[in-house]
Image (spheres, helix red, strand yellow):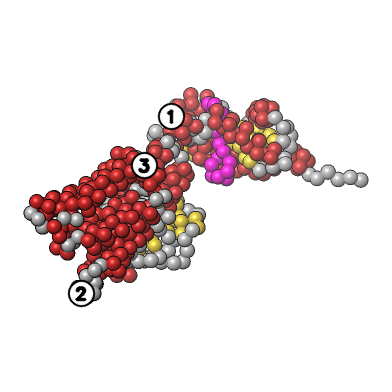
């Protein structure tokens, strides 16, 4: 439910005075005209209209008192809106009854003005009560009713319709204005929060909340282009339910049209208004087609995407919704670009600039985190491989540091091809690397190490003269947490010791070997 735009207990002093003043002053002026006519009647001996003078005085006094009460204590007057409507109806009806017919325009205008004041300050119900009571009193108590029945009825019906139209128009303007204010408040709140958001997931959550608060939509999604062919849809909401990220083609879709043309698109009724060659409907989320659709491009720095909202009902959106969505898209694009740069800087602070593996500090953090997780998993194995390039200094001396750097890059790529996305590789220092393998036993880690060894043995790189150069071998040491040891620092030391043992045994070795892991991991049997 929308709150009233102008609700007395929420309206400050100046705003209340500003709203009530025009109609109240106009009412006072009209009563002043009645007073002038009454004074003129006294001096011109036109005594049949002299009651205009006391009626005008009473009207001025009442209007001034009511205006001061509304201005000073609008909240207190809220509970008196029904008696006030009744009193106003009696006063206006009395004017219509006792004032000569050729002066009826004055109380009629006053009725419209008072109705406007009531609907602005309170609600339609009090306004309609006031208008109905005014017309009812006039109809039932007028002395001219028997003489001019049908003209009288036509005049009152016309007056009622005029008051009704004005009151309803003001009410709808109030609702529309309040709706716009609430949407702007949602946008401002969204803009305030999103300024401090540096995580993509948080930005997406804020965008979703802002759309739900500001736009009455059945569906919405936010997508970013991955390449020239597809859109990665990270936020999908359909009929009260969130869906996992998905992909959609760029070509042949409304969202793709928005992205390609860098223009917003507003389609009130898809059944009648879509006439784009090659554009077809792509269903994301539930298997139901939107009938009303809006799409707005998002462009900022590295971000090129679209936000779209839809409804299963045609003509569900208006220009206000469209303007709001464009503002949301602009803020969202900037926030996502900031999150992208933050993630980029964060990644750079965690990675080695040459190999793109994690740096020493961060791989230690990962190792500690995975060790804690291993404890929570009731002893789930965590394997660590310490790996070192054999005779690397000699290789650099023979072929140059550029070729040495190339070897480190190839080694990192070789390791990545043999580990899972949940695993991690870090450059421990110089030519030494650490490979963290969560939920991996010693035997499984040995398989990974052997594959890395085999890959390096089969590699070759070209020198500056185009000739193939040999690639140095690697030595590796494995240790398992908590199967062998339950302390991270001692785990590192153990893997390091085994690495140097592999070097002492001739290099290009993996320690311990298969027999050790079979014996360690074999189930204990009893006689």
Q: Tag on residue 507?
A: none
For residue 19, above or below residue 492 = below
- Image point (39%, 44%), residue name: 75
Instruction: Point out the stretch of residues depicted in magenta.
Output: 415-432
**Along the line of sight, the residue nearer the viewer: 303 or 237:** 237
Q: Which residue is mark 2?
A: 147
Q: Which residue is mark 1?
A: 402
Residue 14 image position (x, y, % from top left): 30, 39
Say what secondary structure mark 3 lies in.
loop
Instruction: Judge depth for marks 1 and 2 and give the one in front.
Output: 2
Say what secondary structure mark 1 lies in.
helix
Alpha-carbon neighbours of circle 2 within 10 Å: few (<14), some, or many (≥20)?
few
Mark 3 to mark 1 CA distance (whole Å): 83 Å
Q: Which residue is mark 3?
A: 73
Q: Is residue 51 left or right of residue 338?
A: left
Say what secondary structure mark 2 lies in.
loop
């Amino acid at each position: 439910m929308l709150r009233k735009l102008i609700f007395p207990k929420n309206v400050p002093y100046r705003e209340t005075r500003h709203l009530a003043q025009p109609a109240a002053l106009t009412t006072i002026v009209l009563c002043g005209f009645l007073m002038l006519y009454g004074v003129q009647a006294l001096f011109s001996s036109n005594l049949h209209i002299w009651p205009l003078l006391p009626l005008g005085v009473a009207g001025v006094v009442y209007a001034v008192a009511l205006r001061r009460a509304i201005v000073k204590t609008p909240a207190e007057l809220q509970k008196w809106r029904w008696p006030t409507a009744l009193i106003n109806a009696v006063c206006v009806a009395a004017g219509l009854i006792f004032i000569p017919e050729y002066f009826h325009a004055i109380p009629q205008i006053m009725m419209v003005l008072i109705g406007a004041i009531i609907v602005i300050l309170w609600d339609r119900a009090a306004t309609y009560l006031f208008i109905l009571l005014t017309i009812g009193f006039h109809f039932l108590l007028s002395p001219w009713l028997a003489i001019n029945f049908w003209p009288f009825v036509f005049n009152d019906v016309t007056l009622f319709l005029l008051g009704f139209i004005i009151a309803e128009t003001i009410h709808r303007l109030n609702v529309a204005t309040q709706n716009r204010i609430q949407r702007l408040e949602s946008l401002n709140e969204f803009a305030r929060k999103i300024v401090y958001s540096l995580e993509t997931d948080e930005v997406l959550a804020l965008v979703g909340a802002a759309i739900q608060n500001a736009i009455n939509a059945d569906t919405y999604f936010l997508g970013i282009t991955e390449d020239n062919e597809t859109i990665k849809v990270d936020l999908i909401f359909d009929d009260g339910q969130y869906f996992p990220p998905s992909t959609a083609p760029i070509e042949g879709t409304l969202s793709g049209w928005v992205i390609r043309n860098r223009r917003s698109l507003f389609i009130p009724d898809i059944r009648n208004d879509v006439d784009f060659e090659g554009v077809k409907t792509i269903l994301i989320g539930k298997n139901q087609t939107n009938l009303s659709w809006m799409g707005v491009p998002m462009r900022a720095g590295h971000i090129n995407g679209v936000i779209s909202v839809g409804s299963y009902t045609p003509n569900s959106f208006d220009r206000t919704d469209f303007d709001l969505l464009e503002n949301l898209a602009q803020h969202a694009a900037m926030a996502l670009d900031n999150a992208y740069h933050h993630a980029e800087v964060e990644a750079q602070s965690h990675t080695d600039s040459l190999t793109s593996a994690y740096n020493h500090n961060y791989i230690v953090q990962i190792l500690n985190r995975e060790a804690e997780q291993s404890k929570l998993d009731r002893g789930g194995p965590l394997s660590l491989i310490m790996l070192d390039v054999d005779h690397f200094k000699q290789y650099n001396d023979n072929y140059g540091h550029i070729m040495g750097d190339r070897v480190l890059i190839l080694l990192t790529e070789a390791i990545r091809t043999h580990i899972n996305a949940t695993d991690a590789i870090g450059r421990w220092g110089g030519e030494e690397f650490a490979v963290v393998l969560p939920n991996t036993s010693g035997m499984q880690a040995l398989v990974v190490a052997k594959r890395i060894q085999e890959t390096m043995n089969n590699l070759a790189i070209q020198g500056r003269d185009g000739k193939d150069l040999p690639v140095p071998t690697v030595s590796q040491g494995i240790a398992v947490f908590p199967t062998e040891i339950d302390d991270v620092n001692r785990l590192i030391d153990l893997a390091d010791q085994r690495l140097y043992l592999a070097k002492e045994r001739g290099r290009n070795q993996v320690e311990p070997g298969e027999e050790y892991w079979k014996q360690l991991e074999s189930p204990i049997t009893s006689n």
